[in-house]
Image (spheres, rainbow, N blue to C red):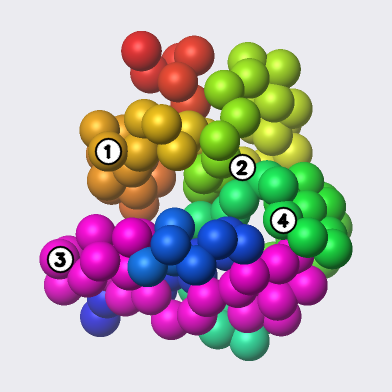
Amino acid sequence: MPRRIVVADDHEVVRQGLRLILSERPEWQIVAEAKDGNEALDAVRAAQPDLLILDISMPGKGGLQVLKELVAEGIDVKILVLTMHESKELIEMVAPMGAAGYVTKSSAGTDLLRAIEHIFDGGKFFPSLNS
């Protein structure tokens, strides 16, 4: 059975790119997409995915609020933050909040698949820890 993934990003081109990249891996399946924080919460609650790929900067509820709410609700989903923000402070903020990994959009070409594999293997993926 494939690993179920929800993608939450406000940019359609990013969601399309992720769909294309992840479709090459038959063991992974995108089961829902969201363009804002509210849709992300609804999608995770409904689809019960194994992984949420979560952008930080989205309209409405941003990724940090989504992360807080999922953890507060006790929803068991691994969360990989995928963001344009290259910030050690943000990494240090999301790791203790429950994120399993952090990949910048500028490094996604080399880090995204590796991060997802590492997270699915039970690990964490943070640039400051994995470099």
Question: Which element carries disc 2, helix, strand or loop?
Answer: loop
Q: Indicate the amino acid at tag 2.
A: Ala
Could you tell me how far apart the alpha carbons at marks 2 and 3 are, in whole angstroms?
A: 25 Å
Q: Indicate the amino acid at tag 4.
A: Met
Image coordinates for residue 99, horizontal then vertical, percent = 61, 42
- Nearer-the-camera pick, 25 or 98: 25
Q: Residue at x 33, y 60 (%)?
A: 17
Could you tell me how far apart the alpha carbons at marks 4 and 1 are, in whole angstroms?
A: 21 Å
Q: Earlier in the sequence, mark 4 or mark 1?
A: 4
Name the quadrant containing residue 94: top right
Q: Indicate the amino acid at tag 1.
A: Gly
- Residue that sits furthest to the bottom in the current view: 46
Could you tell me how far apart the alpha carbons at marks 2 and 4 are, in whole angstroms?
A: 17 Å
Name the quadrant containing residue 77: bottom right
Residue 58: which numbered mark, if any? 4
Residue 99: which numbered mark, if any? 2
Which residues are drawn in magenta? 17-44
Q: Residue at x 27, y 46 (%)?
A: 113
Crowd around label 4: few <14 · some 14–19 · many ≥20 (10 Å): some
Q: Earlier in the sequence, mark 2 or mark 3?
A: 3
Could you tell me how far apart the alpha carbons at marks 3 and 1 are, in whole angstroms?
A: 14 Å
4 or 3: mark nearer the eye: 4
Question: Which element carries disc 3, helix, strand or loop?
Answer: loop
